[in-house]
Image (tube, rainbow, N blue to C red):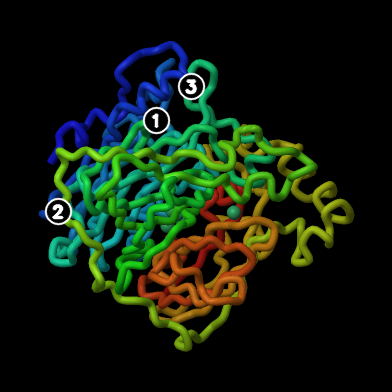
């Protein structure tokens, strides 16, 4: 294990340079990317997470006020095996938080959704029963109306379920050497180098995109990798950016796991799109090379809706940019030099087993089911009492409107599911426990990453055709562009007090009301 990469001090940069964007970035490229500190709870140790305010110096310049778990930004990578995971989350902030275990199959009261507020000074003391296949999950705050700013400030981390069988599977296992976990985010900074969250209307419409990429909370680093097969566990923890990813060299990526676990065999891909909330695990063979880079195309949602009307956000990264450069270091050992032929993941097979069908539209209410043509300019369209009148221009959604308890006024909601903004008090539907359902999710204006709590699902179709290869494994979040048909079996119970959520994982959309809730029982 390489101490320099698993060091707890994960966010400090060496020099306190007054301000730097581009010049210093070249210098920092020489510095190795560090992993999140690992909190290994595979032996049953109690997981303690303290959410607290801190200061983080990201890019030289001034330190930014940030939030983290057990540190100033993000949190540890918590690794657990099957069995009980005693956990305590302490809120040392001055506003309520929640801790949602995204992708963990647990009942509603343990899920950490918006109803499970941890008030300032309180502790949430629970025992999580871990009973699911190995997968890369994550945790983040989920306070309705405050998820976007809290996650942006750092209130997120990684949760990995492992079973100790990866060596037998022929997979890389050395954390920080040939098994890298990469938390991908984009951020903006002000002139002083401080983290800035200033979403304007185009940002809220398209989802917030930053102009600087952070990997594990670090800017401009290079990942040192051995000359051999390396496993990358990718998490898109960005608020709104969708990353169409590939390697600069055109190198193949071998997809081994989707959100909820392993495939039955690696799938070779040239490109992989990762939307907010999604995870993907890939194997990459770096033998016979010296350097390469994981690159991304521009966010496909950028400018899509408001083009010509509101303009672009002015915070784009351009058509192709580096997410993370890789440099091969011959001193590092790769345990694996070939991609395994098969894996032991179970592939979903829920087609034909579904009973109830539900239709879920992620298009905004004011657009109506007819889309732009229907009411863009007239009637109760955008210029009427819709988005602009009520929310955007009237009061703004991220800013002021708060109740006594610090939760934004639901009146400022702009988005909805089936045209209805999220309402904490309204239960949208009930699913009988153990039922398999088929959901048809549509999004015609923009691509929305659709996430469901408490289940892993199978993508049955995308835009009327077979799912793309990257969506053929078990998923809990899927990018809906046009239409996705999915099937899930609802095994975990969730009561009226702590129902499960379904929502868009673009956090500005989620906070703005593109969320619904349901019980299972
Ligand atoms: Cu990752 Cu409902 O959230
Ligand atoms: Cu979730
Ligand atoms: Cu959305």
Whole-percent x and y of residue 397? 64, 40
> Which numbered disc, 2 or 1, marks the residue closer to the eye?
2
Whole-percent x and y of residue 393? 75, 37
Residue that carries the numbered disc 2 in the rendered image: 335
Question: Mark 2 and mark 3 in contact (Cβ < 8 Å)?
Answer: no
Badge 3 or badge 2: first in the primary sequence: 3
Q: In this view, does 84 lie above or below 296?
A: below
Mark 3 residue element: helix
Q: Which residue lies furthest to the left in this view?
A: 43
Whole-percent x and y of residue 167? 14, 61
Is residue 509 found left or right of 38 in the rendered image? Answer: right
Question: Residue at horizontal 84%, vertical 49%?
Answer: 384
Is residue 307 found left or right of 69 in the rendered image? Answer: right
Q: CA gap, disc 3 to disc 1?
A: 10 Å
Q: CA gap, disc 2 to disc 1?
A: 27 Å
Badge 2 or badge 1: first in the primary sequence: 1
Disc on res. 21:
3
Is residue 123 found left or right of 155 in the rendered image? Answer: left
Disc on res. 220:
1
């Amino acid at each position: 294990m390489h101490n320099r990469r698993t060091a707890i001090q994960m966010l400090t940069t060496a020099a306190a340079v007054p301000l730097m964007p581009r010049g210093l970035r070249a210098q920092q490229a020489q510095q190795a990317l560090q992993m999140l500190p690992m909190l290994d709870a595979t032996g049953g140790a109690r997981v303690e997470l303290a959410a607290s305010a801190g200061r983080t110096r990201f890019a030289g310049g001034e330190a930014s006020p940030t939030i983290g778990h057990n540190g100033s930004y993000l949190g540890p990578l918590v690794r657990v095996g099957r069995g009980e995971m005693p956990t305590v989350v302490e809120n040392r902030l001055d506003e309520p938080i929640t801790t949602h275990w995204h992708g963990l199959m647990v009942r509603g009261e343990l899920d950490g959704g918006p109803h499970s507020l941890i008030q300032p000074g309180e502790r949430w003391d629970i025992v999580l029963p871990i009973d699911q296949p190995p997968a890369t999950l994550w945790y983040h705050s989920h306070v309705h109306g405050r998820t976007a700013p809290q996650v942006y400030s750092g209130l997120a981390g990684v949760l990995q379920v492992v079973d100790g069988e990866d060596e037998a599977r022929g997979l890389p296992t050395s954390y920080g050497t040939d098994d890298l976990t990469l938390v991908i985010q984009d951020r903006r900074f002000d002139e002083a180098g401080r983290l800035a969250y200033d979403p304007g209307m185009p940002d809220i419409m398209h989802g917030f995109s930053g102009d600087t990429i952070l990997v594990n909370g670090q800017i401009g680093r290079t990942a040192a990798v051995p000359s051999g097969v390396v496993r990358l566990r990718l998490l898109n923890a960005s608020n709104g950016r969708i990353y169409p990813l590939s390697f600069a060299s055109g190198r193949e990526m071998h997809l081994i796991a989707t959100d909820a676990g392993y495939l039955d065999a690696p799938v070779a891909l040239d490109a992989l799109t990762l939307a907010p909330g999604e995870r993907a695990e890939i194997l990459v063979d770096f033998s016979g090379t010296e350097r390469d880079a994981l690159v991304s195309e521009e966010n496909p949602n950028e400018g899509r809706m408001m083009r010509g009307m509101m303009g672009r956000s002015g915070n784009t990264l351009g058509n192709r940019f580096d997410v993370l450069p890789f440099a091969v270091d011959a001193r590092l050992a790769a345990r694996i030099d070939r991609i395994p032929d098969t894996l032991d993941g179970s592939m979903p097979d829920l087609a034909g087993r579904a009973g109830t069908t539900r239709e879920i539209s992620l298009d905004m209410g004011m657009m109506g089911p007819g889309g732009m043509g229907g009411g863009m300019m007239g009637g109760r369209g955008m210029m009427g009492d819709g988005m602009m009148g009520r929310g955007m221009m009237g009061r703004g959604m991220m800013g002021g409107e708060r109740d006594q308890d610090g939760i934004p006024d639901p009146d400022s909601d702009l988005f909805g599911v089936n045209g209805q903004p999220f309402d904490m008090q309204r239960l949208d539907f009930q699913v009988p426990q153990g039922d398999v359902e088929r959901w048809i999710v549509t999004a015609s204006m923009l691509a929305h990453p659709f996430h469901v709590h408490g289940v892993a699902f199978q993508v049955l179709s995308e835009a009327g055709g077979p799912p793309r290869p990257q969506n053929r494994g078990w998923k809990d979040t899927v990018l809906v562009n046009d239409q996705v048909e999915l099937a899930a079996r609802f095994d975990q119970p969730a009561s009226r007090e702590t129902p499960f959520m379904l929502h868009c994982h673009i956090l500005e959309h989620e906070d703005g009301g593109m969320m619904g809730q349901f019980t299972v029982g």
